[in-house]
Amino acid sequence: MSLLIAFLVLPIITIIVIPFLKVRGKAIVTISAILINALISGHFAIQTLSGQIFDFSFAGSVVTGPIRIQIDALAGWFILILNLVFLTGSFYGLFYMKAYKEQRNNLSLHWISFILLHTSLISICVIQNGIAFLIAWEIMALSAFLAVIFEHEKMATLKAGINYLIQSHVSILFLMVGFIWVAIKTGSYDFQSITSYTQTQGSATGIFLFFCFFIGFAIKAGFVPFHTWLPHAHPAAPTHISGIMSGVIIKIGIFGILRMLLLIKADYTSIGFFILFMSVLSGLYGVMLAIIQHNLKRLLAYHSIENIGIIGMGIGIGCIGLGNGNQLLAAIGFAGALLHTLNHALFKSLLFYVSGIVYQATHTLNIEHLGGLIKKMPQTAMLFLIAAIAICGIPPFNGFVSEFIIYNGLYQWMLNAGLVSLVAIIFSILGLVLIGGLALFCFTKAFSVVFLGQPRVQFNHEIKDAPFLQRLPLYIISFFILAIGLFPKNVLNMLIQPVSLFTGKIEPTFVPFQDGSLDALQTIGWASSGFIVLIAIIFLLRRVVTQKHKATISSTWGCGYVAPTPKIQYTASSYARSYSKLFSNILLIEKEEKTVSGIFPTEAHFKTHPYDWLEKMLIDKPIKLYKSILSRFLFLNNGKLQFSILYGIIFIVSVICIPLFYDEIILFIDFLKQL
Amino acid sequence: MIHVILIVFIITLFYLSIANRMLTYVKVLALQGVLLFFVAFLQLSEINTLNLIFILLETIVFKAIAVPLFLGYLLKRNNITREAEPFLPNFVSLIITTAIVVATILLSNSILDSHLDKMFFVVALSTLFTGLYFIASRRKIITHVMGYMVIENGVFVLSMAVGNEMPMMVNLGVMLDIFASVLILGIFLNKIGDVFKDVDVDQLTNLKDY
Amino acid sequence: MLSLVLTVIAALFFTGIVIRTKSLASGRKGPGIMQPIKDVIRLFKKGAVYSETSSFIFQIAPTIYLASIVMAMLVVPFGQTKGLLSFSCDFIFFAYVLALGKFFSIISAMDTGSSFEGMGASREALYSMFAEPAFFILMGSFALLTGYTSFQEIFAALHIGSYISYALAGLATFVLIMVAMIENSRMPIDDPKTHLELTMVHEVMILDNSGFDLGLILTGGYLKFAIYGTLIFNLFIGIIDYQYAIPLFFIVQFLMAVIVGLIESFSARFRMNHNAQFIVALTSVSLLIFFGALLMLGKFN
Amino acid sequence: MIGIYLIGSFSIAISLFFSKNKNLTVGLLGLFLVLQWILTIYGINNIRSNDFGYFTYDSLAILLLIVISIIAVPAMFHSHIYLNDQPAPPATRSIYYGAIVMLITAISAGYLANHIAVIWIFTEITTLSASALIYHHRNKLALEGTWKYVFICAISITFVFIGILFLSLSLEHAGSDDLTFANLVANSDKLNPFWLKLAFLFIFTGFTAKLGLVPMFTAGVDAKDKAPAPVGALLSSVLMNLGFVGVFRFYVVIANTPLHHWANLVIGIAAVLSIFVSTVYMIKLKNIKRMFAYSSIEHMGIVMLGIAAGGIGYYAAILHIILHAFVKSSMFFQFTQLYRVYQDKSIYHVGNYFKYNTAGAMVLLLGFISATAMPPSGLFVSEFLIFRSLFEAHQIFVLIVVLLLLTMIIWAFGKNIFKILFIPPVDFDDSRVPKISPWESLSQFALLALAVYLGLNPPAEFVNLIKESIMLLPN
């Protein structure tokens, strides 16, 4: 308990102190505070993974009622992920923010919001009381917003930030409705009451309540079609914040969905099918749009949507497992989801950090202007390569492990499934495979256009790699990525407790992964290590053989064309063209081009702006309509005195008269009905 | 007797609605003041004398003499043009006024109340709405003020209805009267006269929201 | 282990046979069966030329490409004998390991900063992306049919008896051969013979590779073919004793090589922008197989 | 006590009106604040006691009295800074001070009044004193704003008066002529419904001018726009509360009659319309003060929704109106400093406030968070409870509509606020920007913190006071 108090008090002290410190001091204090809090929370979290559950209770106030704090394995798992990403992120940010050291107040605001973000995120994981949860949730959203708009003198950044703020507010509205609903029926904001309420009600109630919460959390998690804030917010934020957003903030949406699955008693099968559908949609849509992006961070943002889709597939499979009472399937599904949550947090934050280094080196994120960076920053390029391979789900890295588990779940489920489920399965498999292929397509493009070939634009400032200390957290992350790839079974064993929370709903005594369902991972671990060894062997062989012969350096083979320039390289758009032509009617790319014409053609250009079809249909158009409708009423206060008085008269007269006519109208209608 | 006076009162309303010179408005207001004086004299028979005298003085002094004189003074001082310049032609105003009266009569028809003399109700309400209609339909600021005075008279009539039981109400009405006339007429209309050259409502439309 | 050895042996001859078939079909004598291997060995002895644009990615890529193929080979079983690696859903591992090789061959092509190789890389990425679903659904339907999810168990339990199963096996063979063609970018997807780089997929990607690296890549290509041959063989073999199985294996490999050769000599290459449709068609075929499997299990009722 | 208070403060007001000496002025203001607090403490000590016949220290009055006494202090402080900052002629200064004292006195007395006619009288006085304050700048626009305010308030007061007449008519059926609320509530079953209906309609419509609700909302907006910001703070917080008191006390009466549902209907319609109107203008507005004014209208709409929904909504409404008073006044106070920086109140010419006055920027930020009722703020709790009461009253569609409108408001409000805070204004030379001491923002931080504290963790006495003030309402 005292630790909890410390956990809450420390940030407050830090926030009070930060504004009065030197620029460097702010960052140091923040990081140390986060470190301490991470240790405190991690100390609990680690123990929960070995099956302990901590229960505390604050008195709360008249409004909230008693606030229960419960740290169970699920919360523990997410807390660990949080702390990992936050520690690396803050350390990276320490160096990233050096570029802005003259903006003193701005920095203190930034670091304050940063530490608030950490605290609120962890509290969200453990709070068991509706109102307190909402408060923590919105503190999280607000501090994230403040962190995002660090470069707030840019209008675009602010727009993206506000877009994010509004959408997260919509999400909180849905959550609010859900909690109000339960509170009215049971009179308590405690999470237990959700369970007790849904248990007593029919399954319809449970499903609707779940949808209410699901939409709320899905907006935060970025499920299609609630994803539209994500591709705007991520590029706008400073890089370590983008990394954290994509790494953990959208994951807190996943956490919410999982938590609600634990709490709400409903027809899990239909929920599972629903989530599965949403997830396949999100995965495909996200990656399909990722390919055509020009802005590196936007591209990564769309990949977050894709990965949320993959996680969601895991959850969906798990739910269906719960629904069918098949604890094996449930275990595999939720394990895949939880593990992929960790994996995505790792490689996606790594990718963002690298993109940040690239940005600070070149001052641009438009990949069409980049190229050849691998010669300037080989280390960074390697890190990006590792993360790219991992996110494509290719062995020997961690991405493959979680995707393998999800595949495994799908095939396991297939062995004893009905016709409808089988169709669902086959299309999920189809989706997952396509996602993998498209991701490969996308990241070969991203990596090679950014780092390989020759620079497409000559920068007038010299480009140098980030200092080692800034790259240190990146190495740590990539170490984890490799470690999970090589020893998946050990990581899986950490998941036993969180997963058994879910399987416990079917069969309390069941211990996941002890039945050899996922022993394949052991072999995969060995295989991956063997794979690396094999590569090493072949490479050594090559070394031995080739060193006898001298390698000559010459220009790239241009089919006889002897004056190649960087301009004739393949660009990102041309790489993606064959693809974007295929899906042109889905992708909605706005082109503006001036083609070459005439005998002596003048300069020609060709620009494309990728645009999100769903965003256009679901956000932009309705809002435009809404605003136009509202602006119809602007005449109301036109400054004429007579009108102001007229309103009074109209109000009084109508209130007097409408009831008088009301009965007659009713009579008339009845009369018409009789005709 | 009272009813006769009240009917005359309503007729003055009709006359107001078709009058097109400012001075006519002033005179009609004075006339209304006198009528109200008689109404008060006849109606408030049961209240104690001191109170009655105060009320009578108020009506005769303010409604019949002071306010009309002051209005006339304002007309001269701010050299306001003599025409009323309504937004709507006079006969439309007449029709509307009539409609208002008819409507109030119909409305009063739905009252089942022994305590109240319906005449007062009809006259009061129709005066009230006519006054509001004047405010809404005239262009000059001073006509707004006159419309407001008309409303005041209507309220006074209504307060007559309960005057016997609650003379305090009547006094309050008087207070409202003084307040309105002193504040609105006195201070600000003069200010407006000073600041804006031609006292026209359309000049007072700069505070708006689009 | 057995499958590994046999596949390697098969790989030695496979491409030679293909080439010989083609030259016979076009009325020439053609080079010896071992010619491709000789080429590779000569390449191993040669020095290399690197583009000044390229980085160490370009140098390490062929190694990883070959390694990935060898890795994939370890998973493939031989009849009832497991491959070196065998676990549930190992075909996923198979596909994804191959994907790693693809990843590196693509980025090494982009590494040279050439305009043609990017073209090839883009196509390679697109086609392999489209090809994979077919393979997965195929394996899925086998898994459904047999109730197992690892190569070896599936093939061991796969009994071809009824007519419909013949039909399925036929379709499966077709899909596998086509997938093999796509993976190795042969006809009708891609024509390695053309000398106009613009029309090639795989060959154009390795324009700049030379010497040892090129050798590695070619070896990889040969092995890949043999691997798919082994898979098709497994499809039919079920559980037979070795003394029949091993000869049968070589027969199947030989037949497949001949078939490939014939296809290459008698069919024209598709237009590039028709390839996508064709490859997606494979997916639909494999969906057919899946529903056929449902039919066999009597899930329709 | 109230007698002493009234006499004392009126005399202070008059002497302020004539005092030309700065120190004397300050002394008098201090004296008045002391008097105000004495009254408050006296009221707290003998709560529920009747004073001077027409005044009662009931719980609602005490609550609002405390609120006004708290807000009065920074109001005086900022008025002082304001008048020193842009030196006005001494006559104007003394009128300003006299009027503001009058205003506060009238409002406090209006809270305490237990007789509908007395409330009415003090409402008149507030109009009078407020108009003097609105006309502070002595220019055309100020005059126009004043004129509109005075005229509309006069009309609305007439409406109220007519309402009172009808009320007395309906009271005659009860055979009584005592218009104190206690008596009205006692005889509520005997009141004549027809006259009561008319009475409620007219009184409600009349008070909307003060409460800032549809239909008579326009006057208040112009007033808050034209009045000096410290006065704007009072107008948009405590004066609105006076209007609320007027409506609420009479609502208590009608709530105990069969007309309860009809009254709820009328109030609900007005409330939703107000929220709608504020949304319409929040999107378009470029004038910061008017923006604040419209957000007040929105909040009054929410409060009235709570009243109309009933149940826990009553509690939430009282809580909301108190918290809103703190938040909105603090934002207006902040505006005085913002105006000192930019000498302009149009969004277009204001921006990057964060750079010039960080503390003030934080006030605006927190104020925005509170005014849009985002969770850490206290208003969230009250709004949450109001939504809950709507939900309980099965008004789901109303709830959805309101939520839609509120989301739009947050969007528009946020867009403008963050423009003010962060986006640098076009062609603005920051050479002449005065250095503003962060301590000036202290009072606003205090008010906001108070709002958060009362919202999230209200002390028991506070809760009891609110519960007691809604005791007479049926649930």
Image (spheres, helix red, strand yellow):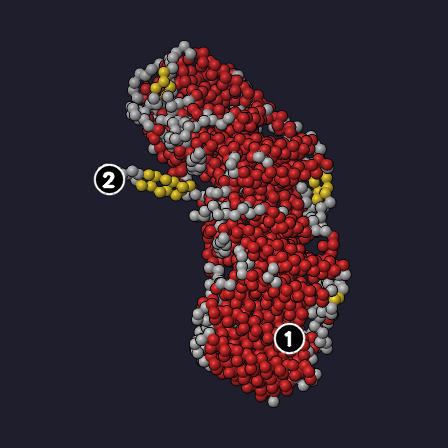
Residue A121 as seen in the image, left or right of residue A390: right
Q: Nearer the viewer, mark 2 or mark 1?
A: 1
Q: Residues within 10 Å of mark 1 (few under 14, many from 20)?
A: some
Q: Chain of mark 1?
A: B
Q: Chain of mark 2?
A: A
Nearer to us in this view, C52 or D358: D358
Residue C240 as seen in the image, left or right of residue D181: left
Visible residue check, residue A414: no
Q: Dot 1 lies on which element?
A: helix
Q: Dot 2 lies on which element?
A: loop
Residue A573 as seen in the image, left or right of residue A671: left
Residue A549 in which image quadrant: top left
- Amino acid under disc 1: Leu
Residue D454, position as x, y percentages in the image: 68, 51
Residue that appears at 38% across and 12% down: A550
Nearer to us in this view, D6 or C247: D6
Residue B1, position as x, y percentages in the image: 61, 89
Residue A472 in which image quadrant: top right
Q: Residues within 10 Å of mark 2 (few under 14, many from 20)?
A: few
Tell me the number on the disc at residue A598.
2
Residue that appears at 61% across and 47% down: D439
Q: CA distance from mark 2 to mark 1?
A: 90 Å
Residue C56, position as x, y percentages in the image: 43, 21
Which quadrant holds the C terminus of chain D?
bottom right
Nearer to us in this view, B155 or A490: B155
**Residue receiving disc 1:** B172
- In the displayed structure, D245 sits above or below A475; it is below
Which quadrant holds the N terminus of chain D?
bottom right
Residue that appears at 63% across and 50% down: D443
